[in-house]
Image (spheres, rainbow, N blue to C red):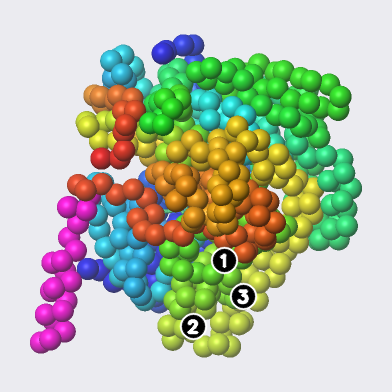
């Protein structure tokens, strides 16, 4: 079995920056990512795609090429197409690549697994043609595929970003159906100080908004009662705006009301998580360097709490400095000296977050959906089912598994986990922290018997033990 | 199944022939299979095992498993699969656990 000083899971900005920094300081580094190219969600396929449509995607996207270049230069082994499904002991990482199981050992691990779109369960959201806004962006970035007749539903900067990109590509969205209200914006002004310190974000956001308005894309704000209509696919979105009911026909619906940390791997390792009220999600408990309460387990980027791509990059660098320091490659003084710049950068990036979180809160009816709305897409469990379990005495997500199959499908609760916690907490009057989250166990992604059979586990293990006895 | 595509394709890659549920399609070689099928006008990728409800890709990042299809008897996430010549794809079985 091969061994690295550091194994990084995820080749997004956090993972790439960390790998480059750690390798520069002399550590052997392996980066595992299930995607075929480096970049993560924001810089998906950046090296291949910049020449094709860097102009549509914008300068922030093109910045990703500096990170992928660093990943190539340094002494880093980047394994593409590697689906990590187990991290055990301290540490043996199992992944699948091209239909075969592989294992690698590491002294330390950095989880840079990024974010997932916050699930947005509303009537009709499981129909074909309804996707996350992030999926719409991935279609554009990776495949050059654009929805001709799409509406954007929800709230947040990413919604404006995809609208602006669709405009530049010549396929503007048919409408923006926005859930944030004037009251949210007024409430957010108490964070205006931070917003001004992170002013570059606001300027960018306002520019995008101006381009959307200039292009004449209809915007509806403070929208409620959203539902998607259709039989075999999405056909229209209905909603209330002010006192008027609207119905907009479309082929594609892009949903977005924020992103949340992807905590599956960290949870499988027993890292403690706590509820973040401002971001309405669980985040792992970490120190200033991204070190968790499990020795040797570091977490950086959006998987540690939502901060965006530049923040992820800085956090990745900081984690790598501490990892190198622990590994004896860097004195504490040198670590602190090198940490000053990324720390300042991180503070700058995070300054505007409280404003953004308050101005674009999640769509409340999708946090506690109607009884008939499915919240678990895999097993088709509805919000009403979860409420009925609570009436029968169920107080935590793991107990729901005794009542029904929520969270037991292939996605392992990635999209229903936070909904189940919120519904149970609401029904029992307990806090999300008291209510807890699904217990996550490996495999993190379904593994086939063929992949397990192809795995070379015993041979290298025995060989190593024999060597030790010699 | 195949309707006018609700999607516009920017790239112009060479095409290869694949079969989806008995229908011949010509898709860009090396493309993301889920994106290519959608661009070719395929909406419904599978029906759920529980209620038989239609599903198509939702996340495009390997997390939701709504894009499952069957290729050579194996259930795969179309959004994590690359288009190659001669792929024979069927809609995932209703009872289709991952095999
Ligand atoms: C779909 C989507 C699109 C987004 N688009 C933008 C955008 O255009 N602009 C923007 O500012 N922000 C965007 N964001 C927000 C984004 O989360 C951050 O800006 C940034 O990508 C965070 O970087 P990261 O390094 O923390 O994680 P990511 O960039 O998300 O990278 C995480 C990587 O980990 C890999 N991974 C996760 N689990 C496993 C596993 N088990 N095995 C192997 N690999 C694994 C993933 O394949 C991924 O490449 C998007 C988020 C999502 C979910
Ligand atoms: S579309 Fe979600 S896993 Fe493929």
In front of the other: label 1 or label 3? 1
Residue annotated with mark 2: A325
Residue annotated with mark 1: A273
Horizontally, residue A2 falls left or right of residue A332, namely left
Q: CA distance from mark 3 to mark 2?
A: 14 Å
SS category of the residue bearing label 2: helix
In front of the other: label 1 or label 2? 1
Q: Residue at x 56, y 85 (%)?
A: A334
Q: Magenta span: helix, strand or loop, mainly?
A: helix
Q: Is residue A23 above or below residue A152?
A: below
Horizontally, residue B28 falls left or right of residue A237, namely left
Few, some or many residues within 10 Å of mark 1 (<14, 14–19, 20+): many
Whichever of labels 1 and 2 marks the residue nearer the N terminus, that label is 1
Tell me residue A470's x, y (percent).
10, 87
Whichever of labels 3 and 2 marks the residue nearer the N terminus, that label is 3
Q: Which mark is residue A288?
A: 3
């Amino acid at each position: 079995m091969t061994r690295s000083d550091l194994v990084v899971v995820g080749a997004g900005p956090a993972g790439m920056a960390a790998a480059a920094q750690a390798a520069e300081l002399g550590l052997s580094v392996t980066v595992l990512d299930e995607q075929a190219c480096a970049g993560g969600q924001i810089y998906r396929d950046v090296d291949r795609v910049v020449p094709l449509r860097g102009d549509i995607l914008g300068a922030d996207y093109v910045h990703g090429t500096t990170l992928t270049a660093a990943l190539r230069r340094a002494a880093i082994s980047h394994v593409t197409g590697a689906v990590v499904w187990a991290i055990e002991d301290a540490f043996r990482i199992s992944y699948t690549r091209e239909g075969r199981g592989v294992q690698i050992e590491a002294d330390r691990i950095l989880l840079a697994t990024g974010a997932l779109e916050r699930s947005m369960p509303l009537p009709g959201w499981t129909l074909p043609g309804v996707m996350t806004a992030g999926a719409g962006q991935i279609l554009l970035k990776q495949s050059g595929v654009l929805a001709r007749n799409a509406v954007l539903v929800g709230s947040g900067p990413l919604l404006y970003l995809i609208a602006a990109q669709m405009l530049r590509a010549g396929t503007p969205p048919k409408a923006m159906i926005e859930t944030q209200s004037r009251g949210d914006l007024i409430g957010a002004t108490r964070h205006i100080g931070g917003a001004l310190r992170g002013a570059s974000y606001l300027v960018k956001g306002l520019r995008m908004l101006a381009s959307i308005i200039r292009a004449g894309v209809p915007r509806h704000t403070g929208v409620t009662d959203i539902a998607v209509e259709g039989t075999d696919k999405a056909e229209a979105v209905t909603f209330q705006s002010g006192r008027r009911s609207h119905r907009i026909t479309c082929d594609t619906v892009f949903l977005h009301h924020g992103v949340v940390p992807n905590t599956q791997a960290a949870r499988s390792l027993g890292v403690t998580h706590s509820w973040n009220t401002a971001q309405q999600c669980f985040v792992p408990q970490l120190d200033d360097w991204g070190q968790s309460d499990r020795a040797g387990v570091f977490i950086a980027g959006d998987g540690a709490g939502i901060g965006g791509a530049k923040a992820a990059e800085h956090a990745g660098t900081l984690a790598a400095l501490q990892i190198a320091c622990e590994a004896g490659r860097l004195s504490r003084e040198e670590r602190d000296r090198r940490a000053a710049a990324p720390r300042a950068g991180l503070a700058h990036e995070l300054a505007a977050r409280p404003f953004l979180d308050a101005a674009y809160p999640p769509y409340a009816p999708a946090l506690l959906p109607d009884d008939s709305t499915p919240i678990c897409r895999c097993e088709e469990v509805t919000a009403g089912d979860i409420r009925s379990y609570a009436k029968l005495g169920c107080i935590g997500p793991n107990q729901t598994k005794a009542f029904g199959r929520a969270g037991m499908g292939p996605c392992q609760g990635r999209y229903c986990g936070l909904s189940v916690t919120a519904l149970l907490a609401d029904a029992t009057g307990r806090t999300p922290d008291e209510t807890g989250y699904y217990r996550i166990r490996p495999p993190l992604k379904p593994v086939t018997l063929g992949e397990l059979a192809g795995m070379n586990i015993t041979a290298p293990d025995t060989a190593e033990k024999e060597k030790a006895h010699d | 199944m195949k309707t006018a595509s609700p999607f516009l394709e920017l790239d112009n890659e060479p095409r290869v022939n694949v079969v989806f549920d008995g229908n011949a399609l010509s898709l860009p070689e090396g493309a993301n299979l889920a994106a290519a099928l959608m661009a070719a006008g395929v909406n419904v990728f599978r029906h759920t095992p529980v209620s038989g409800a239609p599903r198509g890709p939702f996340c495009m990042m390997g997390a939701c498993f709504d894009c499952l299809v069957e290729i050579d008897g194996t259930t795969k996430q179309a959004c994590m699969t690359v288009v190659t010549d001669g792929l024979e794809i069927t809609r995932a079985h209703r009872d289709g656990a991952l095999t």
